[in-house]
Image (tube, helix red, strand yellow):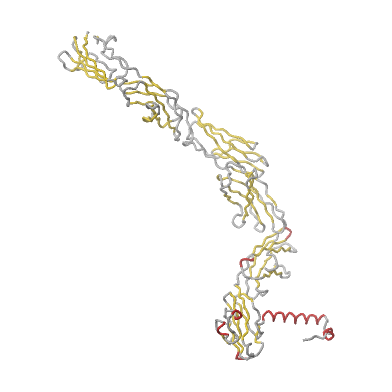
Amino acid sequence: MKINSKALSKFITPFGVLILLLCMFSNQNNAQTASTPNGNFEVNEVVGCAPFTVTPTNLLGGGGSIQYNYDNTLNPGDCTGNYQADPFSCTNGSYTNAIDFTYTTPGDYYLVQLNGNAPDGNKVSYIKITVIEAIEPTYDVFACANNEVFLDIDFTQDSYDSYSIDFGDGSSIQTIDKATDSNELAYTYAIAGDYDITVQGLASGNPTNCSTSTKTISTLDSSPTPVINSLEVMDATMFEVNYESLDSRIAHTLMIESEDGSQLDVITLNPATNATNYTYTNSNFDFVNMVYSVKIESADRCNANAISSETIYSIASEYTAAYLSSDIQVDFNFNTSASGLDQIQFYEGGSSQETFSINTGSVQRTLSNCTLVDSYYFQASFGAAISISAPINPDLNGTLSPPAIQNMDGELVNATFQLDFDQAPVNATSYTIFKKNPDNTFSSIGTSTTPDFIDSNLRSGQLELCYTVAYEDECGNISEMSSEFCFPLSVGTIRLPNAFTPNGDGVNDTFTVGDGVFINFKMQIFDRWGSLIFNSTNPSIGWDGNYNGAPASIGGYAYRISFQDAGNTTIQQTGTLVLIR
């Protein structure tokens, strides 16, 4: 069709331009909603949210000979056959005479018109219909300084192609297109107040039945400064920070950095779940032995300048403990940053004991007993904020070495060796005695609850006995091993008198053998008729001249003595003696 430019110029008036634009828009809209391939019909919209109603308009006439297949999901254009000749082989669903249809299930459909009055080869025409799930748009809205707000829409949570935003102050509705626009939008209100911001999903620019979501925002004059109240270290990997309530309209981050700068972590704080406190855990950090800075930065989404809280620092603390003589000395060491530090206090049993103005130092405590440990910690002041170290609970169970026993005495008593040693300098629950073996190693031979022990396992042939001793205190600490104490054994030698006078004058009153080692000792005394009147296995106990509790008669007697000496040699000796009164 040709257009006469002169004739057209008659209509180029403001009103004419408006009519022309409307016609052009109408033609464009029809092109978007007209059927393929021959434009036999059109629909009001081709994209909409469920429930989505379409109303086809027949453009060729045909009356009752027209049918529609609304729920067809097959694209006739992809059919390998001739859908004009056999439309039923290229579609599914069912045909109906209804002139409108409501889709309730999201998806893509191919609305087919079968027009019996159309020319041959043009009876079938179709339009693609897209039905979107009507879900609420997902977005966040944040308040910024100077009555500005920041909108952040999550494009990934729905199938809309665009959104309309009503900022609730009577201004024009704004539109964001997924294909061309950012998902972030800033807006400034003319005056402060509370506003309802409504976001609606659009399907091809069509709001029909698409869901909306409304959130209320309070504008902000200026961003508040975050305030940390306290920092408490729980253990090596965990601390809790307490702060003034966070404003939910802006973003907040918690920043943790080691003092040497080797470790850094940034955590986003959620005012909904962590309004006033947050427990931080990181197995790669060491809050017991290293110092960390902690601060909160609060920033609105409309500018990059964050407002920071005062920085607070953790306290590194440790202890060492050791026996000094009978006491235990515990040293508590602390370290924190000098930046902003007012003072640091040492707490024992829940009460403050000492105060320091330095950022590093130590506290010493002397315990008279390993069971007297208490609870300890350090607390520092950084301005109005308080920093508390991890609790210090000295473990003195099985971790210390009590001092060794210094002295030991030994005495051979009959066929046993009796040991006496110093009492432990601390409360001891038991002593363990070790004896030297022929290969110069030591083996435990028994325990005692008192500082003495009897070794009854003497081996023949021993010329020397060597011992060491250790003890265990009330907390399960094993002492250092004592020095080696050795006792020589002399060979037993019989020194028997040929007469003795049991008259009670203290001179030669008993018949006994001499000093020395007499193992398996036996001494027997016989009268002149060969009757046994005295028997002893103790070399230190001789015959006192009595028999059955009465003084024996003066005269001659026979004796027989046998024993093993330290060289494991059996010795026997017999002889006679004279009892004189």
* Left or right: 409 in relation to 26: left
Q: Position of residue 464 (x, y in %)?
A: 37, 21
Q: In this rendering, does residue 290 appear at all?
A: yes
Q: Position of residue 173 (x, y in %)?
A: 71, 70
Q: Nearer the viewer, residue 536 or 461?
A: 461
Quadrant in the rendering for residue 447: top left
Quadrant in the rendering for residue 442: top left
Q: Position of residue 222 (x, y in %)?
A: 72, 56
Does residue 499 sit above or below 249 in this rendering? above
Q: In this rendering, does residue 165 appear at all?
A: no
Q: Nearer the viewer, residue 444 or 315?
A: 444
At 37% from the left and 19% from the top, the residue drawn is: 488
Locate the C terminus and report the quarter of the image it occupies. top left
Locate the N terminus and report the quarter of the image it occupies. bottom right
Count of picture labels: 0
Q: Position of residue 379 (x, y in %)?
A: 60, 41
Q: Nearer the viewer, residue 275 or 141?
A: 141
* Left or right: 533 in relation to 265: left
Does residue 512 sit above or below 308 in this rendering? above
Q: Residue pushed farthest left? A: 529
Quadrant in the rendering for residue 542: top left
